[in-house]
Image (cartoon, helix red, strand yellow):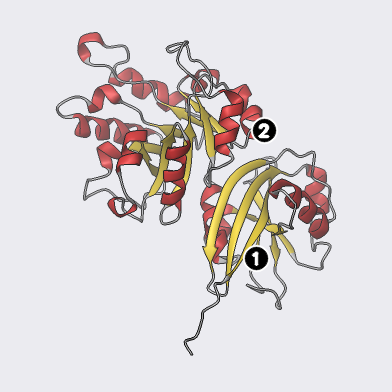
Amino acid sequence: MPTTLTPAKFINVAVAVIAFSGTNAPTRYLLARRHAHQHQGNRFEFVGGKIETGETPRQALLREVYEELGVQMADNGWARLGVICHDYGDQRVSLHVFYTQATAEQYTRLQGQGSEGQALVWATRADISAGNYPLPAANTRIVDWLALPNVIGISRDIAAATNALLTFDTWLDVYTHKLPQHAWLYVRLPSVLAQSDGTQAYLAAWQALHTSRPDVTFLLSYQAVGQLAWYDCDHDHVVLHLNHHQLMGSTAQDLPPSCRYFASCHDANSLSKTNQLAQTHTVMGAFLSPVLPTPTHPDAPTLGWQGFGHLAASSQVPIFALGGIGIADIAAARAHDGYGVAGIRLLDAL
């Protein structure tokens, strides 16, 4: 009689990324060490546990945090990061990942060990990335997402010389001096890319800004850099941006798996395509737009916060609200299953 293979068990897990940012110190993240007898025993992990029948991921998150740490964190304000699916062979997990900032009092309390006797440590992203605290394989994508900011700026265009609205020198000066330390900037230069030498001009603009601001992480147009053989996809400060057309027109096989990606989405189909890409590639997040009316398109159809939330809830990657958005809208974005905000005019408020 032929042997029937039983599919690996599938478990939904709520995961809490708890951060603490002290004065003049790098952000640290709470890790717990799994007991030796557990699956992936003796490895470190972000706190969390199984989502029980009838629970939402957020409900399970708060219950698990209290059970494992003995601390109520319902009032902290949690941001949804995404969903990570991983197959260990003997077990398949779907991690529903959320982020919050611990208060100074909570940081003081969460030292030594948790309520279940598990060792607790606070580690920087650099220490985690260096492998000083070995994590289960499913947690790898979470470490990538720890680099994300609350706000992603989008550059103004460098117009053609015949009707220059922003010259190259002005553009370079503005972003060299305006960007906060370790900012993320989407280098969006459609007028430059439309020129006959658009790719070279685009790369020259980015390289000049990168030279003056090596701390900044850049989202670069896949149109400009995606097909260049010299391009180093492992660059620590580069993420390839796929616009809606590029996202929908490409397959996973078309895109180098060693690169990091960021997508632009407007609807359920593009979010679904992004989720598919995230199964095989490192997808850092996605813009979801347009949320609200903008000064340049005041009468265009928008998602509104309700529509944004409905779509964002289906995303498996961190979502950034775009379109008519200000810095003050971070809380609204997070209340509707987004992680952060993005836009051209956001930098004007910094």
**Residue at which label 1 appears:** 44
Find the distance from the CA under tag 2 to the CA under tag 1. Answer: 29 Å
Mark seen at residue 335: 2
Q: Secondary structure at mark 1?
A: strand
The furthest residue to the left: 196
Decide which of tag 2 and tag 1 comes sooner along the chain.
1
Taking the image as shown, residue 94 lies to the left or right of residue 31, namely left
Query: Which amino acid type is marked by label 1?
Result: Phe
Quadrant (top left/top right/bottom left/bottom right) for the C terminus: top right
- Check disc 2 and report its element: helix, strand or loop: helix
Q: Is residue 166 above or below residue 9?
A: above
Amino acid at dot 2: Ala
| Spot occupied by residue 65 in the image (x, y as percentages of width and height) | 77, 54
> Of 247 and 115, which appears nearest the observer?
247
Q: Nearer the viewer, residue 26 or 266?
A: 266
Q: Position of residue 13 (x, y in %)?
A: 66, 58
